[in-house]
Amino acid sequence: MAEISAKVVKELRDQTGAGMMDCKKALKENDGDIAKSIEWLRQKGITSAGKKAGRVAAEGLVGSYIHTGGRVGVLVEVNCETDFVARREEFQTLVRNIAMQIAACPNVEYVTVDDIPAEIVEKEKAIEMGRDDLGNKPQNIKEKIVQGRIDKRLKELSLMDQPFIRDQNILVEELVKQTIAQLGENVQVRRFARFVLGEGIEKVESNFAEEVAAQMGTN
C-alpha cells in the first residue's frame, strides 16, 4: 500500500485524540481509510484513552525491581485516578513492567522528551552542529540533518519512546495507553530512579602481585 502521509495521520489524530503512533498503525491496518481507522481505534479503546489523558491522577503505586544479582535497582512512581485501580492486577503488572523496562534501558533518563531540560537539548545541538561530516553542507541542509539527529538522541533518553521489552512492536507510551483503555482511568508514569551498584564511586586500582611482593619483602 502507499505510504501514509503525515497530513492524514494528523487528521486522524485531530478527530480521535489518539497518539501519533496509534493513528499511524490504525491507518496502516486499514489501508489509509480514515473512517475504518477511527472504528479500529475505538475497538482497541485507544480513542477513550486519549480523552482520559488530561484527568488528574494522584493515586497509584511506587514499584521496584532488582536485577543482575542486586547490582541494578529501580524505583518508579506510576499514578492512576483511584486507589481501587491501583490495587488491580493489571495496574500492578504495568508498574512491574515499567520498572523492568527502566532497568533494561541504561540510557533512559527522563519519562518523556518534554521532560528533557532545554540546556540538554542545546548541548546536544552544539555537539551535532560541530560534527566533521556536516562541514561542507549548506546551512539549511545542515540544520535539517542536525534536527533529525537531535530528535533521535532525545528519544533515546525518553522512557515513553522506548520499544517495550516484551513486545518490540509497541512503544512504552502505547503500553500505557492500552492500560488506560483497559482500566478506564488516566495512568501516568510520574518519575523514576535507576541505581547501579558502585556508580559514581572512583575505585582504587591496585596491583595484587606488587602488594604480595612488598608484603613478602617485609617478612
Image: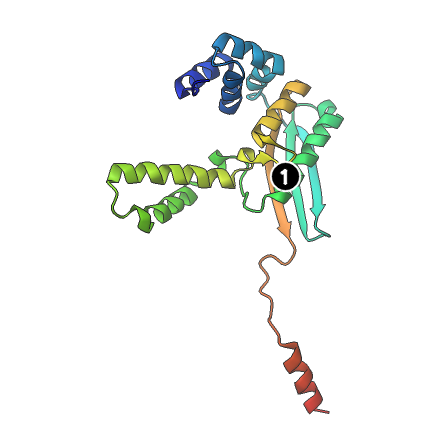
Residue 49 seen in the figure: yes
For residue 149, side relative to residue 81 (left or right): left
| Label 1 Cα neighbours within 10 Å, binned few <14 / some 14-19 / many ≥20 | many
Question: What's the residue at 70%, 28% (across, down)?
Answer: 91
Observer-nearest residue: 89 or 188? 89
Q: Secondary structure at mark 1?
A: helix
Question: What's the residue at 41%, 21% (across, down)?
Answer: 6
When the figure is inspected, residue 88 is found, relative to residue 105, above or below; the finding is above
Observer-nearest residue: 114 or 36? 36
| Amino acid of disc 1 | Gln
Question: What's the residue at 55%, 33% (across, down)?
Answer: 160
State which quarter of the image contains the C terminus.
bottom right
Q: Which residue extends farthest front?
A: 1
When the figure is inspected, residue 161 is found, relative to residue 137, above or below; the finding is above
Q: Dot 1 corresponds to which residue?
A: 101
When the figure is inspected, residue 64 is found, relative to residue 37, above or below; the finding is below
Residue 169 in which image quadrant: top right
User: x, y (%) of residue 56?
Assistant: 59, 23
User: Total marks drawn?
Assistant: 1
For residue 108, side relative to residue 7 (left or right): right
Residue 130 seen in the figure: no
User: x, y (%) of residue 13?
Assistant: 47, 17
User: x, y (%) of residue 45?
Assistant: 61, 15
User: x, y (%) of residue 198?
Assistant: 63, 59
Question: What's the residue at 61%, 28% (across, down)?
Answer: 175
